[in-house]
Amino acid sequence: MHQQFLQQAVELAVQNVESGQGGPYGALIVRHGEIIAGSGNRVTTNLDPTAHAEIMAIRLACQKLQDFQLTDCILYTSCEPCPMCLGAIYWARLQKVYFACDRHDAARAEFDDSFIYDELAIQPAERRIAMLHLELPDASRPFAAWAEKGDKVRY
């Protein structure tokens, strides 16, 4: 069963390329053996650098299920998730991920995310895109407001 869903994600990726919709990536979200959502990469068509296939499938599944957590769902994706998608997978709390190609296959196809993995180990101010911490006297006010909010929805 897992191989069949993964093969469908690969086919979705091929269709995505052939139709001109986007890059060579496809992803499906499955719950209890039923496909909940699927998408190809839409970065160029949506003019959105976050519109990776996995992100798009997660967004669609959350909307369909009316929930921001996908704890009982499995992601099938044509390629090992990039660092951004990996973060989204953890935030969505997916149960499991199956992937076909790995990051090295992607790099050979000129989709190399290794520099992002490398950047994570570097101090923020020293990264290729400097990330500079500025201290403000009331910087923690949003967290204090959250801590005091009685009807918050935890995520």
Image (cartoon, rainbow, N blue to C red):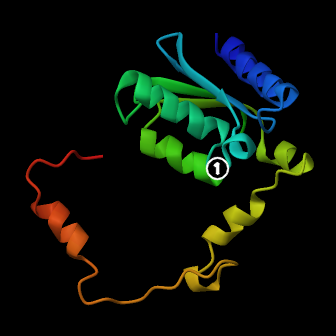
Q: Which residue is mark 1?
A: 48
Q: Quadrant of residue 140?
A: bottom left
Regarding residue 29, the answer to whether it shows in the image is yes
The location of residue 83, given as percent across then percent down, is: 63, 53
Asked whether, in this view, residue 5 is left or right of residue 65, the answer is right
What is the number of callouts on the image? Answer: 1
Indicate left or right for 133 with 150 as reference: right
Q: Nearer the viewer, residue 18 or 115?
A: 18
Q: Is residue 53 above or below residue 91?
A: above
The type of residue carrying mark 1 is: Asp
Q: Looking at the image, is 68 positioned above or below residue 12?
A: below
62 and 32: which is toward the camera = 62
Residue at the spot 19% in from the left edge and 61% down from the top edge? 146
Pick whichever, 47 or 121, lies toward us: 47
What is the crowding at mark 1: few (fewer than 14 residues within 10 Å), some, or many (at least 20)? few
State which quarter of the image contains the N terminus.
Answer: top right
Q: Residue at x 80, y 39 (%)?
A: 23
Q: Position of residue 26 (x, y in %)?
A: 71, 29
Question: Residue 132 location, x and y as percent?
Answer: 52, 85
Outermost residue, right direction? 108
Judged left or right of residue 22, residue 138 is: left
Examine the image and state in which quarter residue 19 appears. Answer: top right
Residue under the image location 46 percent in, 12 percent down = 32
- Left or right of 52 in this view: 74: left
Q: Is residue 28 visible?
A: no
Q: Is residue 123 above or below residue 25?
A: below
Q: Residue at x 42, y 89 (%)?
A: 134
Coordinates of residue 137 in the picture (x, y in percent): 25, 90
Which structural element holds mark 1? loop
Q: Is residue 120 above or below residue 68?
A: below
